[in-house]
Amino acid sequence: MEKKYSKKTYITKMKRFIAALEKGRPFSIQVGGKKIRIPAEAEISIEFEKDDQNELEFQIKW
């Protein structure tokens, strides 16, 4: 599932996520009408792919 957001909305969501990370708390987000709860101990990584286009992904796994 992928949902595109305006830059302003993306920044707001990322700020909430960063605040939760800093406090060691879980994070909840709604994507495409589905509510997702990310535990505080989730694994976070950044992935870069270069093919026909460049792609940078911020990944969270739990």
Image (tube, grey):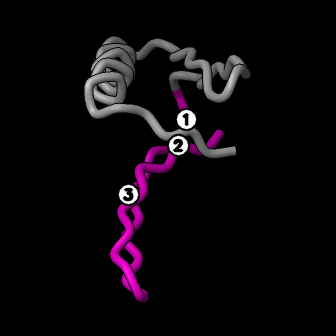
Q: Tell me the kind of residue under disc 3.
A: Ile
The label number, if any, that marks residue 59 in the structure image: none
Q: Name the residue at 45% across, 45% down.
A: 44
Residue 15 at x, y percent in the picture? 28, 20
Q: Tell me the kind of residue under disc 2.
A: Ile
Q: Which residues are magenta?
A: 41-62
Q: Is residue 2 above or below residue 54?
A: above
Tell me if mark 3 has few (under 14), some (14-19) or many (20+) residues whose alpha carbon lies within 10 angstroms of its own: few
Identify the mark nearer the N-term, 2 or 3. 3
Residue 19 at x, y percent in the picture? 30, 15
- Tags 2 and 1 touching, CB below 8 Å: yes
CA gap, disc 2 and disc 3: 9 Å
From the image, state whether disc 2 or disc 1 is nearer to you.
2
Residue 50, magenta (yes or no): yes
Tell me if mark 1 has few (under 14), some (14-19) or many (20+) residues whose alpha carbon lies within 10 angstroms of its own: some
Report the predominant secondary structure element of the magenta stretch.
Answer: strand
Residue 52 at x, y percent in the picture? 41, 87
